[in-house]
């Protein structure tokens, strides 16, 4: 089925990267449904954004059982069905932990118990209209459930053909290491990927805490919030524009951003972002493209998960690939000087 919006001729060719040590290749830019699809963005706009992404070579789409009470999965599934995409041509992920929409009693509709992993995944697949997802994440750790139960639960779903790979989201390094240890002891599959927040303003975990996980286990990253909610685009440096989403929307995320505005943390971040503008101007790129390319410069990042409520935002994200060659060692040093938050190297003790 032809797209109603033509791919711009100047759009760079999509790049694909292996997900950690797996043989799976994902587009280095992914499209996620957090806070948008199934929520404040109408379905037709969601379809347009997903189709634009697919036409641009993006093959990775991310959602979760907790996004918009399961509606994000529904609308993504409807889009896939609408355009008749072949199942082997795209990679889709979902995340399990918050499944309140799956039932009336919240007691066992959350966490990572074997019961919720199995039932939650089945509910997600039903909403997506798929037989399996490619990637299945533990959407935050569950410290009430034994790690062996968690590892066995994800492996059961893989053995049943309901997922191909499993991973974590916002887990601490020692928790991921314990999951790997349990999996090795049991002869099972450990987590292949982690979905953390990672951007110019949030770096410690990905650049320092996970260092040994890359080396020992080949952990792959699929980070979210590469623009930190839009702050790194620079458009909020002078406050929240009256026509912006944060100004007109009443969803939970927009409200949280409104509360942050003019706080000490906001002012500090805005000052840093404003200081990055001369570097972006010198390179002839937007601050958004600079920020996204900076995330992709990290060799452990397999795919950066972006959001879009308009087709133009999809194109802008893809254009960040043109910025990558411009991020020389010298430029990266200039950026670090402005950010002032480069984590210290992990010290080994033998």
Image: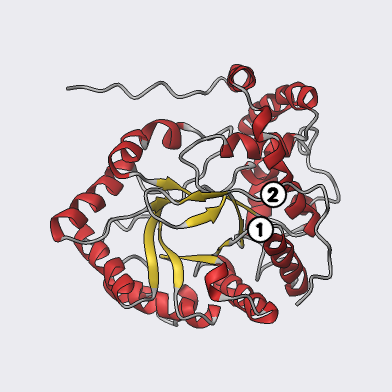
Residue shown at the point (71%, 25%) measured from the top left: 276
How crowded is the residue under tag 1: few (<14 C-alpha within 10 Å), some, or many (20+)? many
Where residue 34 appears, as percent x and y from the top left, is 60, 60
Whether residue 70 sits left or right of residue 81 in the image: it is: left
**Tag 1 residue:** 57
**Tag 2 residue:** 13
Where residue 228 appears, as percent x and y from the top left, is 62, 42
Residue shown at the point (52%, 66%) measured from the top left: 92
Where residue 44 appears, as percent x and y from the top left, is 77, 73
SS category of the residue bearing label 1? loop
Q: Nearer the viewer, residue 307 or 158?
A: 158
Whether residue 309 sits left or right of residue 168 in the image: it is: right
The reply to whether dot 2 and dot 1 touch (C-beta < 8 Å) is yes
Residue shown at the point (26%, 63%) measured from the top left: 150
Where residue 274 appears, as percent x and y from the top left, is 74, 26
How crowded is the residue under tag 2: few (<14 C-alpha within 10 Å), some, or many (20+)? few
Q: CA gap, disc 2 to disc 1?
A: 8 Å
């Amino acid at each position: 089925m032809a797209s109603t919006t033509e791919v711009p001729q100047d759009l760079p060719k999509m790049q694909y990267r292996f997900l950690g040590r797996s043989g799976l290749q994902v587009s280095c830019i992914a499209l996620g449904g957090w806070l948008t699809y199934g929520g404040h963005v109408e379905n037709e706009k969601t379809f347009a954004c997903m189709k634009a992404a697919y036409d641009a070579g993006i093959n990775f789409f991310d959602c979760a059982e907790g996004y918009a009470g399961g509606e994000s999965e529904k609308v993504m599934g409807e889009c896939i069905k609408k355009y008749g995409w072949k199942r082997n041509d795209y990679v889709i992920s979902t995340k399990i932990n918050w499944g309140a929409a799956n039932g009336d009693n919240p007691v066992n509709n959350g966490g990572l118990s074997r019961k919720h992993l199995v039932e939650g995944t089945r509910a997600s697949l039903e909403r997506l209209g798929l037989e399996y997802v490619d990637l299945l994440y533990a959407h935050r750790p569950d410290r009430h459930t034994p790690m062996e139960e968690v590892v066995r639960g994800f492996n059961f779903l893989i053995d049943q053909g309901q997922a191909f790979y499993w991973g974590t989201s916002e887990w601490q390094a020692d928790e991921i290491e314990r999951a790997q240890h349990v999996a090795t002891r049991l002869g099972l599959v450990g987590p292949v990927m982690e979905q953390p927040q990672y951007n110019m303003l949030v770096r410690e975990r990905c650049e320092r805490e996970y260092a040994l996980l890359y080396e020992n286990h080949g952990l792959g990253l699929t980070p979210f919030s590469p623009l930190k909610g839009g702050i790194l685009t620079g458009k909020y440096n002078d406050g929240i524009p009256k026509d912006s989403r944060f100004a007109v929307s009443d969803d939970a995320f927009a409200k949280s951003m409104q509360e942050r505005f003019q706080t000490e943390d906001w002012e500090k971040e805005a000052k840093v972002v404003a200081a990055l503008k001369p570097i972006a101007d010198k390179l002839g790129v937007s601050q958004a493209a600079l920020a996204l390319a900076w995330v992709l410069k990290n060799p452990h990042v397999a795919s950066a998960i972006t959001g879009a409520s308009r087709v133009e935002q999809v194109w802008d994200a893809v254009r960040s690939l043109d910025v990558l060659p411009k991020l020389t060692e010298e430029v990266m040093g200039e950026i670090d000087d402005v950010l002032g938050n480069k984590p210290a190297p992990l010290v080994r003790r033998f």
